[in-house]
Amino acid sequence: MSRAAIFEWEGREYTHGPKSADWYWALGIIAVASTTASILFGNYLLTVLIVVAAITLALHGAKHPPLHRFRIVEQGLAIGDELYPFDNMISFAILEDVEDEFPPLLSVKNESWLSPHLMIPLEGVNADMIYEYFLHHVDEGKHEHSFSDLVAAWLGF
């Protein structure tokens, strides 16, 4: 089904910062030390979890984020081919960086249990116009970065 876009832009989930060799060495050292400790304590399930987590972090650190196409249509927010209807949204907020280093983010909390909190970069689009449009369709709420967002930023993601 084709939907006429009211606003349309492209963006990436996060800014890719290339990881240095030191980052990978630190990850490896922490993983080996944690794995050794969990083996010494006899917690083999934790050992497997640590190894899988370290490999996953290394692979995620090496990949570049995909380019997504965001569209605001009459029914809601479309990311690629997936539609998030306004009716399923609980609240929204526009998060802006105080130092203007990063583009503003559209934060949307919705009823979906698979993706209850969407963070969408508003690079290349007028954030004030997006704010005004969303204000007519969804309640505004106080949103802050989640703990997982802060940990991801600390890890360089």
Image (tube, rainbow, N blue to C red):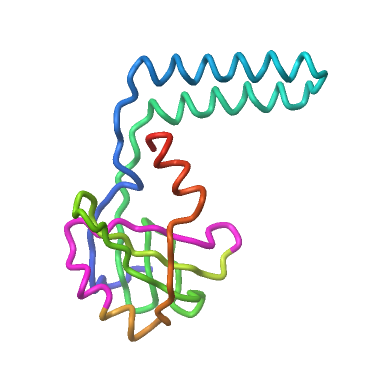
Q: Is residue 61 magenta?
A: no
**Residue at point 32% right, 50% down?**
68
- Going by the image, does 124 lie left or right of 113? left
User: Which x, y percent locates residue 15?
Assistant: 29, 41
Residue 44 placement, left or right of 123: right
How many dots with numbers? 0
In the image, the segment drawn in magenta is 113-131
Extreme residue in the right direction = 42
- Which sits in the foreground, 151 or 10? 151
Q: Residue at x 33, y 33 (%)?
A: 64
What residue do we see at 43% from left, 62% from top?
144
Which quarter of the figure has residue 40? top right
Looking at the picture, how far across and down is residue 130, in whole percent? 25, 73
Q: Check the image and report above or below for 109 versus 99.
A: below
Q: Nearer the viewer, residue 95 or 79?
A: 95
Give the x, y percent position of residue 67. 30, 45
Q: Residue furthest bottom?
A: 136
Residue at image position (43%, 67%) is 143
In the displayed structure, 152 sits above or below 113; it is above
Viewport quadrant of the N terminus: bottom left
Q: Is residue 22 or residue 128 the one in the foreground?
A: 22
Asked if the magenta segment contains residue 115, the reply would be yes
- Of residue 91 and residue 87, the one placed in the foreground of this image is 91
Quadrant hosting residue 30: top right
Percent x, y of residue 93? 37, 71
Image quarter of the C terminus: top left
Q: Is residue 1 above or below residue 86?
A: above
